[in-house]
Image: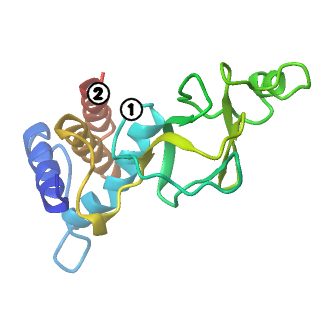
Amino acid sequence: MGHTEIVQKVRDILNEHVPDGAVSLDGITEDCVRLEDYIESAIPDAVVMLAQKGYRVNVCTDTPQINGANAIILPDDFISLLSVKLDNWNKIITKITEVGTPEYIMAMNEFTTPKANTPMCYKKGTLLICLPDSDVLDLFEYNKNYDKEEDSLSADLKEATAVCYMTAALVLGMFGDDQGKQRLSDVATNMLQ
């Protein structure tokens, strides 16, 4: 779905789900911010919010550069990890272990280090450290941030539509309609379940 299609879909959602007079657009004139500007500013936030809730939106499968045997340099548009697998692992990892958590402490002690059947990843700055190490990356998928210059969401139609609903919810929030924001936010998350 291209950028102009996204903006138009959000306008359609707002027109369909907001009763006349429910949101005051008073004060918005041609010399102020246009509704499209509000919509465009909310699209990246909508992608991030859905990705943080664990949904696959705007997925990227570009193979990043490996810095050393176990460190993947994270792309600038990285939001959240979907899956990673190195060639000598027996399973795919779908989450990043937070440094300092009990899971991390258990995995990093001298008796229970990560092995092929129990691999792990943790983030260190702009690097994703993967253990046990390998020189070959088999799989790397992540949610990427929305970039207007790319002019599209790489998600399928259902996911792109969910982003449009979440964007509409954020726009309603900008105008103080918290009930409408919650209603459209729920529609967006329910679409992806």
Residue 28 sits in quarter = bottom left
State the residue lying farthest toward the right.
110
What's the residue at 38%, 32% (across, down)?
Answer: 55
Category of crowding for the residue at label 1, using alpha-carbon neighbours closer than 10 angstroms: few (below 14), some (14–19), many (at least 20): some
Amino acid type, callout 2: Leu
**Residue 43 placement (x, y as % from top left):** 31, 54
Amino acid type, callout 1: Tyr
Which label's residue is closer to the chain start, 2 or 1?
Answer: 1
Q: Which SS class for mark 1?
A: loop
**Residue 51 placement (x, y as % from top left):** 42, 39
Judge left or right: residue 107 versus residue 168: right
Category of crowding for the residue at label 2, using alpha-carbon neighbours closer than 10 angstroms: few (below 14), some (14–19), many (at least 20): some
Q: Which numbered disc covers residue 192?
A: 2
Q: Which SS class for mark 2?
A: loop
Colour scheme shown: rainbow
Q: Quadrant of the C terminus?
A: top left
> What's the CA distance linking mark 2 and mark 1?
7 Å
**Residue 121 placement (x, y as % from top left):** 66, 36
* Residue named by callout 1: 55
48 or 68: nearer the viewer = 68
> Does residue 16 sit above or below 24 in this rendering?
above
**Residue 62 placement (x, y as % from top left):** 42, 52
State the residue lying farthest toward the bottom.
31
193 or 91: nearer the viewer = 91
Can see residue 26? no
Q: Are marks 2 and 1 in contact (CB under 8 Å)?
A: yes
What's the residue at 9%, 47% (across, down)?
Answer: 12
Can see residue 171? yes
What's the residue at 14%, 62% (across, down)?
Answer: 4
111 or 133: nearer the viewer = 133
Judge left or right: residue 106 versus residue 54: right
